[in-house]
Image (cartoon, rainbow, N blue to C red):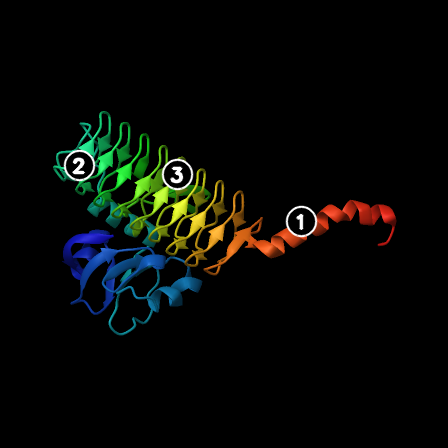
Amino acid sequence: MKLPVPIPIIEIAALINAELIGDTSMIATGINEIHKVQQGDITFVDVEKYFDKSLNSAASFIILNKKIDCPEGKALLVCDAPFKAYNDLVWRFRPFRPLTKMISDTAIIHPSAVIEPHAVIGNYVKIGKNCHIQANTFIGDYSEVGDNSNIQAGAIIGTDAFYYKKENGKLHKWRSGGRAIIEEDVEIGAGCTINKGVSGDTIIGAGTKFDSQIHIGHGAVIGKNCLFAGQVGVGGKTIIEDEVVLYGQVGIAQNLVIGKGAVVLAKSGVSKNLKGGKVYFGYPAKEVKESYRELAALRQLPAILKSGKID
C-alpha cells in the first residue's frame, strides 16, 4: 500500500517508538509485506533466519527486533515487537471507517455508471464510466472498478485478506491495507468474492470474465482476457498470466505462477507452477496426456491383479 503522502522515516520511527539506524534522511512512500516490497517501502521481520532476505529485498526500511549493521541506502527501525509496529502503521494509514449509508460520500462514481438498488459502495471506491453494478453487490473501501465492467448481483469485492500471524499460540489478524482492482471490460459473476491484498493489490486484468461463485484470495494477480468457470478458487498471492482458462471447480494453491495461455480442466487441483500454452488435468494437475495415460493404466489394475501377472 502507498502512504497518503511521503513521510520522513524519522517521523515513522517516532510513531512506533523505534531506534533508527542508517540513513535518517530518507522518505517512506509505502508499507508492504516482504513479497510485495518496492523501493521506498517499509517492511518488517522478526525471525533472525529471515533477516538477510529482508535486508536484500527492494524495501528501503526494515522494522526488526535486533541491532545489526545497516546496508547502504537503507534504514532499520529497531523495536521489541516488529509485527505489532508494522500492523499499527497499516491501521494508522488505513483506519477503520464504518459505513453509515449505502454509498459512501467519498466514493467517486462516473455519471454514466449504473448502480442498482441495495448495492453497497465503500469509502474511497472508484467506479469508471459505463459500469453496471447489480443489486446487492458489495464493493469495499479503496476498491477500483474500471470502465465498462459489470459486477453481477451479490458479488463481494474488496473483503479482508484471510491472513494471520501466529504468536504465543494465538492467531493475530493482519490489517488489510491493500486494494481490490478490477480493470476495464471485466465481468464478475454473481456471488463471487475477491479479497483485497494484505498490503499490495489484488488485481483482475482487463477483459477477464468470471462465472458465478468464484473466490480470489488476497494479493492474487489475474491477467488479461482470462476465462474462469464457476467455483474456481485461487489462493493468495498467486499470479495467473494472460489468457488462462480455468474450468469449473479448479483449485489453485497460494504463491504459484500459472503461465500465459494455460488451460486447466474441471475439478483439477494445482499445487505447483504451470507452464503456459499447455492443457492440464488431475490432482495434482499434470499435462492432460500424462494424466489420461495414468487413469487408463489405473483402470487396468484390477484385471492385472486378478491375472496374477504381478507380485
Residue 178 percent across, percent down from the top left: 28, 48
Residue 295 numbered tag: 1
Residue indicated by mark 3: 211
Answer with mark 2 or mark 3, whichever residue precedes in sequence.
2
Q: Residue furthest right?
A: 308
Question: Can you tell which quarter of the image residue 10 is in?
Answer: bottom left
Residue 232 lies left or right of residue 61; in this view the side is right
Q: Amino acid at mark 3?
A: Asp
How many neighbours does mark 1 have within 10 angstroms: few (below 14), some (14-19), or many (20 or more)? few
Q: Amino acid at mark 2?
A: Ala
Residue 296 percent across, percent down from the top left: 69, 50
Residue 227 percent across, percent down from the top left: 39, 46
How many neighbours does mark 2 have within 10 angstroms: few (below 14), some (14-19), or many (20 or more)? some
Q: Amino acid at mark 1?
A: Leu
Residue 205 lies left or right of residue 109; in this view the side is right
- Image quarter where the C terminus lies is bottom right
Element type where label 2 sits in the image: loop
> Residue at 31% across / 33% down in the picture?
152
Question: Can you tell which quarter of the image residue 130 is in?
Answer: top left
Name the one closer to the observer, 16 or 240.
240
Name the one closer to the observer, 42 or 116.
116
Answer with mark 1 or mark 2, whichever residue precedes in sequence.
2
> Residue at 43% across / 54% down in the picture?
255
Q: Is residue 246 visible?
A: yes
Name the one closer to the observer, 156 or 29.
156
Answer with mark 3 or mark 1, whichever residue precedes in sequence.
3
Residue 150 lies left or right of residue 242; in this view the side is left
Residue 47 percent across, percent down from the top left: 41, 59
Residue indicated by mark 2: 113
Q: Residue furthest top?
A: 117
